[in-house]
């Protein structure tokens, strides 16, 4: 079982203000063992954090990362299905300024693992460090970006990302079907710090569009002196919050992304929807 949470915002210093209203629905159930990883962009630089999950304890997103500053982040927590719980297998995977996380397990992965590797340019193939199906999907995506000449481009845009993600997913689907396996349920998210692109197929994806915060409870309780119970507003704040996983708590705070669809967040925080498949 795995989940991810993603934020893209125009106000890197207000992540706590964004996350606090969602605190109760951004808590993941306890696991026997597992790990979590965070990739976040602070002033354009991709930083990371990787830690084990505390055995038998739930995971509260707000508690773990509410104090960081970031224009965008991808947080992922997993219990291993392919590949052990170790740093090299922990999402989000990174390449230069790209970050990628994946929920789901590729059916019959061992039967076509080598085909995926053979489809990559050598210099991308050499950067594979772990042994998960998710990491190979990420590097296959990078291969299509490389073929299009956009893997090293600053802010190539959401269309360029979709144009690499869709054929990467389709290639894996074809390999699976050729080996006699069904299509796998998946949700993925990719960011370069400017754009965010999320795809959902068979695993729920939901999102919330935040346009301003009034009467900020986070600021009132943690930033304003207790003797000054004044209201704090962030009227210019814009953010998109995305979450995905097989066992998410339902909430009216989120809208569901239609299955087999792609949600893209542009560098100026507009949201685009496209179908997949």
Image (cartoon, rainbow, N blue to C red):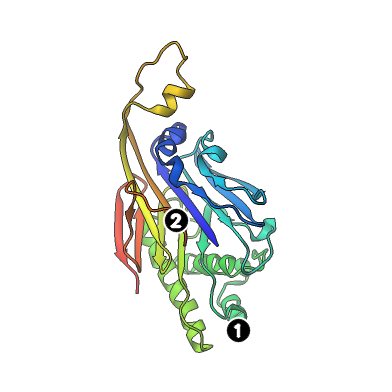
Q: How crowded is mark 2: few (under 14 residues within 10 Å), some or many (20 or more)?
A: some
The answer to whether residue 88 is left or right of residue 1 is right
Residue drawn at x 70%, y 58% as measured from the top left: 86
Using the image, determine if residue 143 lies above or below residue 109.
above
Question: Quick one: SS at disc 1?
Answer: helix
The answer to whether residue 59 is left or right of residue 255 is right
Using the image, determine if residue 36 lies above or below residue 131.
above
In the image, residue 19 lies at what x, y percent?
A: 44, 39
Residue drawn at x 40%, y 27% as measured from the top left: 217
Quarter of the figure with the C terminus: bottom left
Question: Quick one: SS at disc 2?
Answer: loop
In the image, residue 39 lies at what x, y percent?
A: 55, 48
In the image, residue 31 lies at what x, y percent?
A: 61, 56
Q: Looking at this view, is 250 or 207 the one in front? A: 250
Using the image, determine if residue 18 lies above or below residue 195.
above
Q: Residues within 10 Å of mark 1 (few under 14, many from 20)?
A: some
Q: Which of marks 2 and 1 is in front?
A: 2
Residue drawn at x 41%, y 51% as measured from the top left: 242
* Distance Cα–Cα, label 2 vs label 1: 31 Å
Quarter of the figure with the N terminus: bottom right
In the image, residue 59 lies at what x, y percent?
A: 56, 47
Q: Are marks 2 and 1 in contact (CB under 8 Å)?
A: no
Q: Name the residue under label 1.
A: 111
Q: Can residue 110 be seen?
A: yes
Q: Name the residue under label 2.
A: 248
């Amino acid at each position: 079982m795995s989940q991810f949470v993603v934020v893209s915002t125009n106000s890197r210093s207000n992540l706590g203000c964004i996350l606090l209203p969602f605190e109760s629905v951004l808590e993941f159930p306890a696991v026997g063992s597992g790990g979590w990883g965070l990739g976040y962009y602070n002033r354009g630089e991709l930083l990371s954090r990787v830690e084990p999950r505390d055995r038998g304890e739930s995971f509260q997103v707000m508690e773990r990362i509410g104090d960081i500053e970031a224009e965008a982040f991808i947080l992922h927590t997993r219990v291993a299905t392919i590949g052990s719980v170790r740093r090299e297998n922990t999402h989000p995977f990174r390449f230069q300024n790209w970050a990628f996380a994946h929920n789901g397990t590729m059916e019959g992965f061992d039967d076509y693992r080598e085909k995926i590797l053979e489809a990559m340019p050598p210099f991308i193939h050499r950067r594979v460090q772990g042994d998960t199906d998710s990491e190979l999907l990420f590097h296959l995506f990078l291969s299509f970006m490389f073929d299009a000449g956009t893997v090293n481009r600053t802010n190539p845009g959401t269309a360029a990302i979709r144009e690499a993600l869709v054929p990467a997913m389709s290639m894996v689907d074809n390999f699976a079907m050729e080996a006699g396996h069904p299509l796998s349920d998946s949700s993925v998210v990719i960011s370069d710090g400017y754009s965010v692109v999320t795809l959902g197929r068979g695993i729920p994806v939901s999102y919330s569009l935040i346009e301003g915060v009034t009467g900020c409870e986070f600021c009132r309780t943690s930033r304003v002196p207790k003797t000054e119970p004044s209201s704090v507003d962030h009227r210019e704040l814009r953010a998109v919050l995305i979450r995905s996983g097989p066992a998410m708590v339902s909430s009216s705070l989120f809208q569901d992304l239609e299955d087999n669809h792609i949600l893209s967040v542009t560098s100026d925080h507009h949201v685009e929807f496209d179908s997949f498949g």
